[in-house]
Image (cartoon, grey):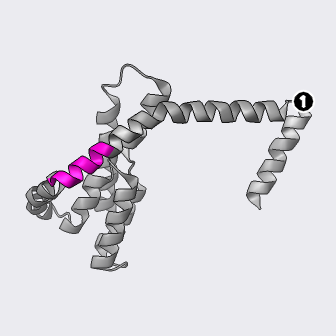
Amino acid sequence: MILCLFALFCLGCGLWKKVPLYDAFSAGAREGLQTAVQVLPALLCMLAALQALDESGLTAAVERLMGPVMEKMGVPSALLPLMLLRPLSGAGALAALEQVMENCGPDSRESLLAGVMVGSSETVFYTVAVYLAAARVKHTGYIIPCALLACLAGYVGALVFCP
């Protein structure tokens, strides 16, 4: 209902300002397709790298190494796969969230923490790949570290503020 009202509002504004709506729509669609074509190689490379990491067993090895350290810091080990996957893959993080909820129960502290972590963090490398491919930014040395720090802040916030 709200979407229909918004569409009617936009249509009315376009007619009132005498904007050629069809031309504006087709130009926007053309730009969207061009952006998708520019972004596709970066996305394919990122997906291939994620698959290679998973198939190589590197993520499982990192989980085994970091698990005891995270437990001593007060982070449940059930959250480690989610914390490792979230910056890389949104779908992988949602699968890890589902696993936490199945294994620990939907009302457990681990599930609450996992939900807050997923909601307060971003798929850093996916987002950066899309924006950099679309914008063709050359100076990117600070973007990924800052984005990872923001993701870490979401994790720490979940651990500090969730009971």
Which residue appears at 80% of the width and 43% of the height?
10
Q: Is residue 126 left or right of residue 34?
A: left
Instruction: Find residue 46 and report its image quarter.
Output: top left
Confirm whether the magenta stretch covers residue 131: no
Q: Is residue 122 left or right of residue 152?
A: right
Q: Quadrant of the N terminus?
A: bottom right
3 shown above or below 15: below
Decide which of 22, 132 is in the foreground and name it. 22
Residue sitting farthest toward the top: 138
Q: Amino acid at mark 1?
A: Lys
Place of residue 124 in the rendered image (x, y in percent of width and height, measured from the top left) = 36, 43
Instruction: Find residue 35 and report its image quarter.
Output: top right
Range drawn in magenta: 48-57
Determine the secondary structure under disc 1.
loop
Q: Which residue is mark 1?
A: 18
Badge 1 density bin: few <14, some 14–19, many ≥20, Cα 10 Å = few
Which residue appears at 33% of the width and 62% of the height?
161
Which residue appears at 49% of the width and 26% of the height?
135
Q: Is residue 117 visible?
A: no
Place of residue 147 in the rendered image (x, y in percent of width and height, measured from the top left) = 35, 39
Overall secondary structure of the magenta section: helix
Q: Quadrant of the C terminus?
A: bottom left
81 shown above or below 17: below
Place of residue 25 in the rendered image (x, y in percent of width and height, measured from the top left) = 75, 36
- Looking at the rendered structure, the number of numbered marks drawn on it comes to 1
Q: Is residue 8 left or right of residue 66?
A: right
Decide which of 59, 66 is in the foreground and name it. 59
Place of residue 101 in the rendered image (x, y in percent of width and height, measured from the top left) = 34, 74
Which residue appears at 43% of the width and 29% of the height?
132
Q: Is residue 142 visible?
A: yes
59 shown above or below 107: above
